[in-house]
Amino acid sequence: MIIVFGNQKGGCGKTTNCAQFANYLSELGKEVLVLDLDFQRSLMDRREEDIKTYDNEPKYEIMEAKISDVAKVIRDFKNVDNGNLIIDLPGRIDNDALGVILNAADIIVCPFRYDKFTMDSTGFFIQIIQYLKVKAKVFFLPNNIRSSVRYETKEQIISILEKIGVVTKEIPQSVLMERANTLLITGECMNLVKGAYDCIIEQGGIK
């Protein structure tokens, strides 16, 4: 299964949730391969740093690839019987090859927040998905949500997003997510993400 994490805006939790979701699936005993397409090599750099810092053995591999080469990677992966390819898209979507990725996806996960700037970028990302007529199941992941803040447009935003895909449970703001690494997920962090990630796993049919 091909699972893509994407949004047009950086800082919405795309890369962090990509890594945490890979950790979560691995913890459940599922086969995972992560493809880092971010121009900043965020996941690759983090994996290298994590290996230097922690004693834990990696439970899955992280690869990097050029956008222009990703079609071949996807073709090769589709020849594998089992497993989940998790792709971290670049924050900037301006390359024709990204259409190949989105159309190949089985699941698209779009982390977002309820602030205006993030919602504007999320709206642009939705337009791209609709323009490409992708068939993937789309999940909107409310991320880094502050319990002390009253989001006045929250219900309106959810009602709009639910016409396009599934809105998962919220992941609250927590320093535990900021300390995430690519080698393991703590029990406390699993509790934070469980509701949202289980929704993606169960409704997305991830095996």
Image (tube, helix red, strand yellow):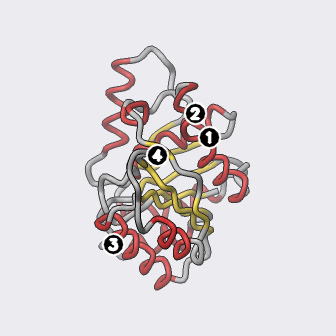
Q: Residues within 10 Å of mark 3 (few under 14, many from 20)?
A: some
Mark nearest the camera among 2 and 4 is 2
| Residues at discs 2 and 1 in contact (Cβ within 8 Å) | yes
Q: Secondary structure at mark 3?
A: helix
What residue did someone put label 3 on? 120
Q: CA distance from mark 4 to mark 3?
A: 20 Å
- At 50% from the left and 39% from the top, the residue drawn is 20
The quadrant in which residue 31 appears is top right
Report how far apart the C-alphas of labels 2 and 4 lie in the structure: 12 Å
Depth check: give the residue in front, 158 or 97: 158
Sequence-wise, which precedes: disc 4 or disc 3? Answer: 4
Q: Which residue is mark 4?
A: 17
Query: Which is more foreground, mark 4 or mark 3?
Result: 3
Q: Quadrant of residue 153?
A: bottom left
The spot of residue 50 in percent (x, y) is: 37, 25
Q: Residue at x 56, y 57 (%)?
A: 3
Q: CA distance from mark 3 to mark 1?
A: 27 Å
Of mark 3 and mark 2, the one earlier in the sequence is 3
Q: Which residue is mark 2?
A: 190
Query: Disc 1 and disc 4: Cα gap in Å?
Result: 12 Å
Q: Amino acid at mark 1?
A: Lys
Q: Which residue does the numbered mark 1 point to in the structure image?
A: 194
Locate residue 91 relative to residue 17 in the image: left or right.
left
Mark-to-mark CA distance, 3 and 2: 29 Å
Query: Which residue: 59% across, 70% down?
Result: 165
Q: Residue 133: image x %, image y %?
A: 54, 83
Cα distance in 3D space between marks 2 and 1: 6 Å
The kind of residue on which mark 2 rests is: Met
